[in-house]
Amino acid sequence: MRALLSVSDKSGIVEFAKALSEMGWEIISTGGTYKKLKESGLSVIEIDEVTKFPECFEGRVKTLNPYVHGGILHKRGDEGHVKQAQELGVEGIDLVCVNLYPFKETIERTDDFEEIIENIDIGGPTMVRSAAKNFNDVIIVTSSGDYDNVIDALRNDGNTLEFRRGLMIKAFEHTAAYDSMIANYMNGRFNDGFGEYQFITGKKAFQTRYGENPHQQGALYEFDGHFSENFKQIKGEASFNNINDVNGALKITTSFGTQNAVCIVKHGNPCGFAIKETLLESYTEALKCDPVSAFGGVVAVNGIVTKELAEKMNEIFLEVVMAADFEPEALEVFEPKKRLKLFSQGTKKLVMSNDKYDFKHVDGGFVYQNSDCICDNEVHNAHQKSTLTASEQEMKDLEIAWKVAGLTKSNCVVYVKDSAMVAVGMGMTSRVDAAQCALKKAKEMGLDVSGAAMASEAFFPFRDSVDAAAAAGVKAIIEPGGSIRDDEVIEAANEHGISLYFTTVRHFLH
């Protein structure tokens, strides 16, 4: 039995080769892998001895040879294949262990196109595909994480067709992801990221409890390990909806940097938000906005959950708490809550992966775009359109209202007072309805909106929303501007003694 080992990531390769050698396998290898195995005292056959042809063109051609691919691809159970292999002097290669040139690491390290090109693997993917195609007879190993499983299978009669089939699937996933990464990089470099094809690849992080509904299956797939880096599930089993809600809460909370922000989300939309001196105060104020909707909701905490905060949260039923971290005493408080799920980042403050692109499934395909960004300077650089200037606290409230509105389903109107959201209307077909729905909810909750700041993520097409805001006692408004009736909106603000600011940027979220 012969094994061909050619890896860029050499972790564990010596131990793997030694185990194979102890079982009587001949080891064939190339380049740096050959050198490392030889230095470790192993008996290794250099690839030139198999190909009967030297490596050439600065190593670009090493394994692209009939003696290699014939040895991998010929079918052992086919008399014609076996006879032809004997006639051609092709010996079988029964195990292929390959991982590919570090293209991802290269593009992260340099912009030198020549170096990037040289780190596109050709021989490696070809060998992987050959071995995977002939998995009936050949073991294909593409991950160092499978070394122990392969050795165990070979030692204990576990080298079954089903075992090799599992490795085959991994191998084709490996080459597909690799080629997709290269194509996406080239389109990003030369076609603004929008080529003829767009490849979205992710590695399975975990199976969700179910999909949007219990009769649907679901799983979370991550880009380059980013989800696993930022989300550590420390209690409970999350569902598809839990993950979606956590994502919405996290986006809003992290947009305020290191401030003590707490966001409560239900069905993807915020029903509470506040920034106060302490996280306990922030949560308490956020909950006041809509405690009815918060029941069964998701909470994102931009900091470390203490025992005191955990006890406060335990007063109602929550589905998920996402925090930078939890004190051990807080985890003890949450332990009796069997249906509660906890996520931690193991940090002092929450962070986001900040994916560059965004996409949404539509029937028959998906729409793809650059990710939206609500920048800190949008409020600071907003154009004052009214004669009245907002106070310092009103500017803080405008910033909160603006960011929350931009990260909430359109049409959306948000009211913020003393750094806490007091009303929100979202997902409405009419902006006036969104404004009035928010005020109606605030009234039901017994919340005083007078003196609040208001934000709309897109322009007001008429002055009626400003008139309604004035009737509720709103003192400051921020919106993108850009309506043909902007002059009427500005006039209304001045009539009512409201400070008005235009950001010139809209943030639809559909």
Image (tube, helix red, strand yellow):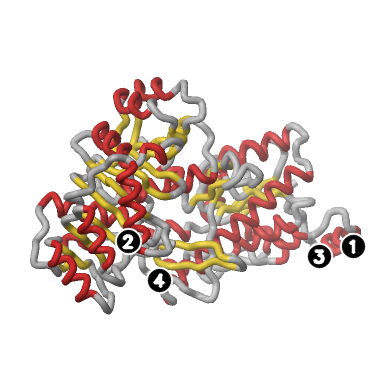
Q: Residue at x 66, y 47 (%)?
A: 27
Could you tell me the amino acid type at mark 2? Cys
The residue tagged with tag 2: helix, strand or loop? loop
Select label 2 or label 4 by which is in front.
Answer: 2
User: According to the image, label 1 marks what residue?
Assistant: 80
Select label 2 or label 3 by which is in front.
Answer: 2
Could you tell me the amino acid type at mark 3? Leu
N-term-proximal mark, 4 vs 3: 3
User: According to the image, label 4 marks what residue?
Assistant: 113
Select label 1 or label 4 by which is in front.
Answer: 4
| Residue positioned most to the bottom | 484
Taking the image as shown, residue 495 lies to the left or right of residue 175, namely: left
Please say if the residues under marks 2 and 3 sit with CB atoms less than 8 Å apart: no
Report how far apart the C-alphas of labels 2 and 1 lie in the structure. Answer: 62 Å
Q: What quarter of the picture does the C terminus occupy?
A: bottom left
Please say if the residues under marks 2 and 1 sit with CB atoms less than 8 Å apart: no
Report how far apart the C-alphas of labels 1 and 4 lie in the structure. Answer: 46 Å
Report how far apart the C-alphas of labels 3 and 1 lie in the structure. Answer: 12 Å
N-term-proximal mark, 2 vs 3: 3
N-term-proximal mark, 2 vs 4: 4
Select label 4 or label 3 by which is in front.
Answer: 4
